[in-house]
């Protein structure tokens, strides 16, 4: 099911193409600035400023088109995912619902799919942009000053030793946060449904203490 829902479609390919074009245009700006710094005639300065303006407009245009296409593709995929999840719940066994809270299931449909949406619409396009920018920047830097570029390139492995542990910590935090959001949503839904029972038994203080404990545990991961 994942392969069918998350397959690469035409909009993703076209969106990637426009984002790559946007990144390549952004990489041209340092080369134009190099020409300005090295010294140019008045006529050439005006020409290079105009070129920079066109590149800036083109970069913004291609980037907007790319993100728009990714957004269209992502929204369509999320709609399919939510449809599949809801269909799965409709035909699920009764024992499944006995073990699950309705709020947690609602959170899975709304919150968890929103995380996937964020990845498809924002994170994945940014990964493409970053890869092109990093590779292109290396080429541009070597063309401008290969000595300094070589020094920077040597320091990259050292930076990875710092970035990778931080990335692992962030991943664990994000997973725990998503689980806590699902639990909190489930508890909220269940307790709101029991509102009449709480009022009948005058158990407001008991439930207030319950929520203080729940929210305190939720707050510790922030």
Image: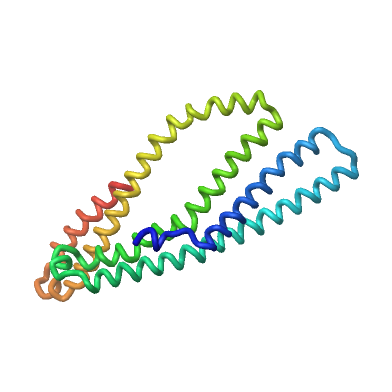
Badge count: 0
Q: Position of residue 32 (x, y in %)?
A: 76, 41
Placement of 87 over or under 8, stated as above or below:
below
Q: Nearer the viewer, residue 10 or 149?
A: 10
Q: Nearer the viewer, residue 174 or 12?
A: 12
Q: Residue at x 54, y 49 (%)?
A: 128
Q: Is residue 185 left or right of residue 55?
A: left
Q: Position of residue 34 (x, y in %)?
A: 76, 36
Quarter assignment of residue 215: bottom left
Q: Nearer the viewer, residue 170 or 157?
A: 157
Q: Nearer the viewer, residue 44 or 24?
A: 24
Q: Position of residue 41 (x, y in %)?
A: 90, 39
Q: Residue at x 43, y 31 (%)?
A: 162
Placement of 128 over or under 185, stated as above or below:
above
Q: Quadrant of the N terminus?
A: bottom left
Q: Residue at x 27, y 52 (%)?
A: 218
Q: Spot the residue most to the left.
A: 201
Q: Is residue 78 left or right of residue 25?
A: left
Placement of 214 over or under 191, stated as above or below:
above
**Color encoding of the figure:** rainbow
Q: Is residue 101 left or right of residue 38?
A: left
Quarter assignment of residue 104: bottom left
Q: Is residue 35 left or right of residue 159?
A: right
Q: Position of residue 130 (x, y in %)?
A: 55, 45
């Amino acid at each position: 099911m994942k392969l069918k829902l998350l397959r690469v479609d035409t909009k993703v390919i076209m969106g990637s193409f426009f984002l790559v074009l946007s990144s390549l245009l952004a990489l041209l700006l340092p080369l134009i600035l190099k020409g300005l710094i090295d010294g140019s005639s008045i006529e050439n300065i005006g020409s290079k400023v105009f070129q920079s303006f066109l590149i800036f407009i083109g970069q913004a245009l291609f980037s907007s088109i790319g993100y728009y296409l990714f957004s269209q593709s992502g929204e369509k995929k999320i709609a399919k995912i939510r449809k599949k999840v809801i269909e799965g719940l409709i035909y699920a066994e009764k024992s499944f619902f006995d073990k699950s809270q309705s709020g947690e299931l609602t959170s899975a449909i709304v919150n968890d799919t929103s995380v996937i949406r964020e990845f498809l619409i924002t994170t994945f396009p940014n990964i493409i942009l970053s890869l092109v920018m990093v590779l292109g920047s290396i080429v541009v830097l070597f063309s401008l000053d290969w000595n300094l570029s070589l020094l920077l390139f040597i320091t990259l492995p050292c930076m990875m030793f710092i970035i990778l542990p931080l990335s692992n910590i962030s991943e664990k935090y994000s997973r725990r946060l998503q689980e806590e959001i699902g639990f909190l949503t489930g508890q909220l839904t269940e307790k709101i449904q029991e509102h009449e029972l709480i009022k009948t038994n005058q158990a407001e203080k008991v439930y207030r203490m319950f929520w203080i404990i729940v929210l305190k545990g939720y707050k510790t991961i922030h």
